[in-house]
Image (cartoon, grey):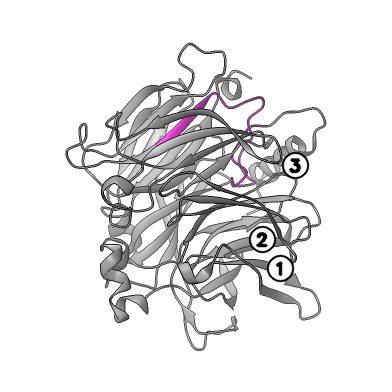
Amino acid sequence: MKSARFITAAALTALLVQAPGVALADETCQSPYMAKLTGEEEFVYIWTLGMEGLGDGSDKLVTVDSRKDSPTFGQVIDVDSVGGRHEAHHGGLSDDRKTYWVSGLDTGHIFLFDIANDPSNPKLVKIITDFTEKSGVVGPHGAYALPGRVMISGLSNAKDRDGPTGLVEYTNDGEYITTHWMPKGEKIEGVKLDTVADGYGYDARVLPRKNVMLTSSFTGWNNYMTDLGKVVKDPEAMKKFGQTMVVWDFHARKPKQVLSVPGVPLEIRWAWGPKNDYAFTTTALTSKLYVIHEDKKKGDWAATDVADIGDPSKLPLPVDISLSADDSTLFVNTFMDGTLRVFDVRDPFKPKQILEKKLGNQVNMVSQSWDGKRFYFTTSLLSKWDKKGKENDQFLKAFYWDGKDLKPRFEIDFIKAELGRPHLMRFGSKSLYSN
């Protein structure tokens, strides 16, 4: 797998990250194989769930102008509906940043948008409708850039719409390659089991220099497409949530170790430092911050609970997280109380909370510019899990970060604008394609 393209992408990333005097503006959660933007982000692309009776009711890609000197700064400048409601959720960019892959957790459709030809006006260029038929996986989740490929993490399978699930690879052109199934069982040849492998999936992230891929776990279609109130009252449904993370041999795409991380570990963020061999995750149901780190004495990996996030007894439900590019600061959103909590993680095993700020009745996704000076937040978790009535905030909020607090930049109410429920964000800029 060590193609010339593989080496070039990794080297380019390292050069851009380390180059002095270069201001980088890109989500810090992105794949290390992906080209990075220079200068400030110009556009924010928001993958948005349609709401019945609101506007056209369809899922859509919303483009917002974030150019500070633009006459349309902080405004919606383009809307691309995809027709129907597919449970718009996650996605990502290809390694060359030319294509924005977004998907629907319900229908399994994957939508490919060209954001290179005119970054201010994305164009839908392909719809993959046979994802489940070809892969056997239900619920395409993240789209993670690999050299010349995109890896889709799944949430369910076609047989029972529960676990186990898999990781699905496509070419950058949207052609199916293969499926890698998550490990499941009490005994798996060649895999160290710190607990029983439950087969659930969610996020997938790679640390190239260690040849390690880490995956986390959520729940299946039967749960995430059911009203949250019904799920929490159903003892059998509550048993069907992931409690594990898997360490993979990335090049071989083979699981090596299954870690016990009880409470539903969701987003994964590897540290960026050249000697920082650890990643952060949070657990949705137990509200814990974990560090996944190399245990050199044992020659494997370990999961260590390092902090509570809010009051776990109140189920604040940690969702998205963002790690600063210098590995010093971790931003954690909790959905149920609509709050951002910021931690000093210079010592990853002794995090210190330095800010707690309520952003709304609910908050989900967070994206920060690579230079750590601008932050963007959206609200929707899942259509069946979002709050109801007056508590159903649906917004995009942009802020400046001064190292201590957030200062308002602009805000868009997605319900008033008749757009829907904003979820995943990615950035774009004309400068990337003009150089």
Q: Earlier in the sequence, mark 2 or mark 1?
A: 2
Which residue has dot 2 on it? 279
423 lies left or right of 248: left
Magenta stretch?
25-46
Report whether residue 251 is seen. no
18 lies left or right of 301: right
- Between the residue at mark 3 and the residue at mark 1, the CA separation in whole angstroms equals 21 Å
Q: Which quadrant of the figure contains the C terminus?
A: top right
Q: Earlier in the sequence, mark 2 or mark 3?
A: 3
* Residue 173 position by quadrant: top left
40 lies left or right of 90: right
| Residue plotted at (40% across, 37% down) | 395
Magenta stretch mostly in which secondary structure? Answer: loop
In the rendered image, residue 111, in percent from the top left (x then y), is placed at 35, 40
Which residue has dot 3 on it? 14
Which residue has dot 1 on it? 293
Q: Earlier in the sequence, mark 3 or mark 1?
A: 3
Name the amino acid type tagged 2: Ala
Question: Vertical placement of 20 versus 156: above or below?
Answer: above
In the rendered image, residue 120, in percent from the top left (x then y), is placed at 45, 21
